[in-house]
Image (cartoon, grey):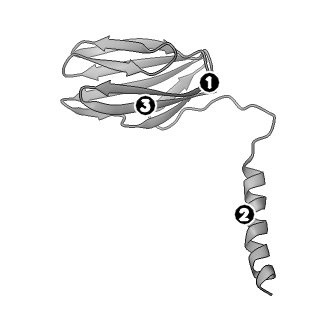
Amino acid sequence: MRLSTLAAPLALVLAMSLTACGSDDADPPSSSQGATQDGDTVAVTVTREGDEFTPNGERVELGVDQTLVLTIESDEAGELHVHSTPEQEIAYDAGTSEHELVIDRPGVVEVESHEPDVVLLQLEVR
């Protein structure tokens, strides 16, 4: 009797995990909230007011070699670090600036500020 009590939930968990697996049909990467996609580019606006950043840890999906356009609106100069291979740095001045990034390897790449220490984006590159 105890085995049958455990069998139903176990079968449900197994069925759900199998349906969660993707098919061989690759869907193009989609953008998350706050990111917009236009053809071959994904655009994200980063805002800095003092030590506060928006977005804060948001995950954005990109295709390998797809262009990410970062618009940075900041009340002071700073630098973002892109932990890709090779690593990239984006220096920006106070005001609005636009920067393009292309990641050529799949994986999750963090875009962060080191002063203050904040992860702004996690780029999920597929």
At horizontal 47% and vertical 22% (from top left) the residue drawn is 43
Q: Which residue is mark 2?
A: 13
What is the quadrant of residue 47 in the picture?
top left
* Mark number displayed over residue 8: none
- Left/right of residue 61 with respect to residue 100 in the rendered view: right
Q: Is residue 2 left or right of residue 75?
A: right
Residue 28 x/y as whole percent: 68, 28
Please report whichever mark, 1 or 2, sits nearer to the chain's N-terminal start: 2
Q: Which kind of residue does numbered mark 2 sit on?
A: Val
**Residue for badge 3:** 121
Q: CA distance from mark 2 to mark 3?
A: 32 Å
Q: Quadrant of residue 14?
A: bottom right
Please tell me which residue lies in front, 84 or 100. 84
Residue 50 in the image: x percent, y percent? 18, 29
At x 77%, y 52%, the residue is: 19
Q: Secondary structure at mark 1?
A: loop
Q: Is residue 16 left or right of residue 75?
A: right
Q: Which mark is residue 106?
A: 1
Contact between labelled residues 3 and 2, with CB atoms less than 8 Å apart: no
Neighbor class of circle 1 (other Cα within 10 Å; few <14, some 14-19, many 20+) is: some
Q: Residue at x 43, y 31 (%)?
A: 121
Q: Earlier in the sequence, mark 2 or mark 3?
A: 2
Q: Where's residue 60, x and y in %?
A: 51, 32
Name the amino acid, label 1: Pro
User: Label 1, label 3: how many angstroms apart (C-alpha)?
Assistant: 15 Å
Kindly indicate the quadrant of the structure image that contains residue 95. Answer: top left
As drawn, is 71 to the left or to the right of 115?
right
Mark 3 surroundings within 10 Å by alpha-carbon count, few (fewer than 14), some (14 through 19), many (20 or more): many
Q: Tag 3: residue type?
A: Leu
